[in-house]
Every structure is written in structure tokens, then in C-alpha cells.
Image: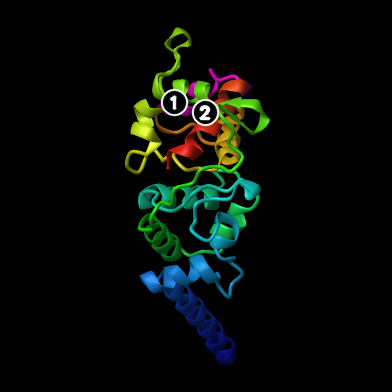
Amino acid sequence: MTHVRQCVLALAASALGVRGALGQKVSPAGAAEIVHQGTARGVPPCVSCHGPQLMGLAAMASPRLAGQDSAYVLAQLDAYVSGARNDAVMHPVASLLSPAEREAVAAYVSRLPVARVVPASASGDTMPGGANLRLGEILATRGRWATGLPACDQCHGPGGVGVGAAVPPLAGQPWIYLSNQLHAYQQGTRPPGPLSLMSAIAGRLTDADIAAVAAYYPTRS
């Protein structure tokens, strides 16, 4: 009985030790290792999906992480873990990171420079799928007040640079990622954001509007 009790205590101590290690503060070098090499626990390197400069990859429909507000990135990672934000790829990835690792990665990517990205497929005023770049610029900078649609820049800042932890940047994001997120807001598969504004705004966009706005912002980094 004493032996069993000792085993139980040893296992408990071991579990606490693991938990303690996972909860320890992660250095910037440790965060860089996660981003560029992944972890032995099965977390893939962030660059494998988000690109070598973390500017996002259209082929993966993955967003730009470089230069994003650290609190915003951390909130998204936590939302993937809780299931509040539904994504079949990011849920298991974020769940394998400890809270301290998620915080360190968010801080690390926020300090990365934002590279200029001009889609190679841009041609005149149109983008893939026939999206009209001029319409995208109008909706982004002026909105369409006849239908109660404010300009995207009104909340996301001039050129879609983002505003603090609550309002992410749109500039430089891959067009397919922006398109997917606007559709997700329409369909209720992504949380509606502060004051439920994004669900209301996305609900006023047509498919052509979404394609146009999504085509415009990749040129604004």
C-alpha cells in the first residue's frame, strides 16, 4: 500500500513538473524556434503555412502574421484552442502550444517587419476571378453609405493598417484569406468581433464586393 501511494505521489509530482515546465516563460529565442522549426511535441513551424516572412500564403489561404498586434494574435490563438474560432488546422496546432508559448509566439511575430507584397496576378483594375480593384478601393476608402456600409478603413485605419488589439490589419493579407474570413462572418462560423460589427458589415456585402475588397488590400502592404 505504501509502495502504491509512493507511485501515485511520484506520478503527481511528475505531472506537476511537466505542467510547470509548460507554464514557464518562453524566451524570444524559444519563440523563434517554434516559428521556424516547430516543436518536438508535433507543432509544425509557423513558416510552413504562413510563408518564410510570415506574410501569409494564398495557396494555403493563410494570413499574414508579421507585424500584427501581439494581443490580437494571442487572442486568436486562444480562440482556436477554445473552439470559439473554428479551424481544422489551427485548432490542433494552437492546442499543442502552452499558454506561455502562445504568448511568446504572438510577441515574436508582432516584431517582424511587414514586407511589400504585390500580387503577381494583378492586371490593370482586375484580380483573379474578375474582382474589380477599383470597386475594392471605393469600398475600402469610402464605403457605400446608400446601403449603410462604412469604409473598411474607418475601423481598420488608413490603408487597412490595423488598430490595436481589437482591429487587425487588412493590408498585405492574401486575398483568399480575406475572402474566406468575410464569408465566415456572413455564415456565422467566425465570432462577430467587437460589437458584432463584422457580421453586420459582411452581411451587407455581395460576393462581388467581397472579391473586390479582398483583391484590393493585398496591394496595400
144, 191: nearer the viewer: 144
User: In the figure, 72 relative to 179: above or below?
Assistant: below
Image height of 43 relative to 189, above or below: below
Instruction: Count numbered badges in the picture.
Output: 2
Q: Would you say residue 203 sits in the magenta stretch?
A: yes
The secondary structure that dominates the magenta segment is helix
Element carrying mark 2: helix
Residue 32 located left or right of residue 90: left
Q: Give the quarter of the image for residue 185.
A: top right
Nearer the observer, 164 or 51: 51
Q: Secondary structure at mark 1?
A: helix
C-alpha separation, residue under disc 2 versus residue under disc 1? 7 Å
Establish if 17 lies above or below 170: below
The colour scheme used to paint the residues is rainbow
Q: Which residue was labeled with disc 2?
A: 213
Question: Which amino acid does the dot numbered 1 rest on?
Answer: Ala
The single residue placed furthest to the bottom in the displayed view is 3
Residue 116: in sight, yes or no?
yes
Q: Quadrant of the N terminus?
A: bottom right
Residue 56: percent from left, percent from top? 54, 50
- Specify whether residue 95 is in view: no
Magenta run includes residue 214: no
Q: Residue at x 56, y 22 (%)?
A: 209
Which residue in the rendered view is the most extreme toward the top?
A: 146
The residue stretch that appears in magenta = 195-207
Q: Which residue is mark 1?
A: 140
Numbered tag placed on residue 99 in the rendering:
none
At 38% from the left edge and 34% from the top edge, which residue is drawn? 159
